[in-house]
Image: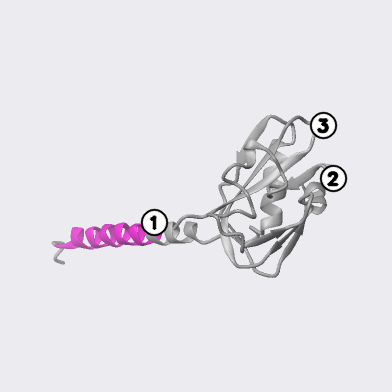
């Protein structure tokens, strides 16, 4: 039997593996752009709040969340999910005076007040138009109130 040329089959297999690996890397990078399943805004706000509930820390979520028009959020519900007491959490809205809200106001995004509607004292948040971005949480100390803000995603 002629045994010449058998090394070429192994070389073809190596080329196929490299091409498959390159395709996998491209697909995984595309999947990372998509918002992960279960990244609902209230869940991300609560998780971010849990990370700062000891106080004195500002944390911005790494996850971009999509706020859908017509949805509403209550600060007390976010507080409970985040391990805080009702009344301990408020949203960064025009009625909240904190330097930690600077650039993270729900109701003043690029000077356009039409994405969210906040009540006073920022206990309820209503989404008026679809918008995506990142949330930020900050607690003064472990016993004081916390604030949750939002920054529009740049594209």
The image quarter containing residue 48 is: top right
- What segment carries the magenta color? 5-24
Q: Which residue is mark 1?
A: 25
Label 3: few (<14), some (14–19) or many (≥20) C-alpha neighbours in 10 Å = few
Instruction: State the image coordinates of residue 8 (x, y, percent, origin top left).
Output: 19, 61
What residue is rendered at 28% in x and 61% in y?
13
What residue is rendered at 57% in x and 63% in y?
131
The label number, if any, that marks residue 87 in the structure image: 2
Label 1: few (<14), some (14–19) or many (≥20) C-alpha neighbours in 10 Å = few
Instruction: State the image coordinates of residue 45 (x, y, percent, origin top left).
Output: 69, 50
User: For numbered disc 2, what is the local secondary structure?
Assistant: loop
* 25 relative to 77 in the view: left or right: left
The image quarter containing residue 129 is: bottom right
Which residue is most to the right? 86
In which quadrant will I find the N terminus?
A: bottom left
From the image, state whether disc 1 or disc 2 is nearer to you. 2
């Amino acid at each position: 039997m002629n045994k010449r040329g058998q090394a070429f089959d192994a070389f073809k297999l190596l080329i196929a593996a490299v091409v498959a690996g390159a395709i996998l890397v491209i697909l995984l990078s595309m999947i990372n752009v998509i918002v992960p399943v279960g990244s609902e805004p209230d869940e991300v706000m609560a998780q971010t709040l849990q990370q700062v509930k000891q106080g004195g820390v500002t944390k911005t979520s790494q996850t971009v969340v999509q706020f859908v028009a017509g949805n509403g959020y209550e600060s007390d519900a976010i507080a409970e999910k985040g391990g805080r007491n009702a009344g301990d959490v408020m949203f960064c809205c025009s009625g909240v005076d904190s330097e930690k809200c600077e650039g993270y106001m729900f109701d003043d995004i690029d000077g356009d007040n039409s994405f969210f509607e906040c009540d006073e004292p920022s206990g309820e948040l209503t989404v008026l138009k679809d918008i995506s971005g990142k949330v930020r949480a900050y607690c003064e100390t472990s016993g004081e109130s916390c604030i949750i803000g939002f920054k529009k995603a740049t594209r």
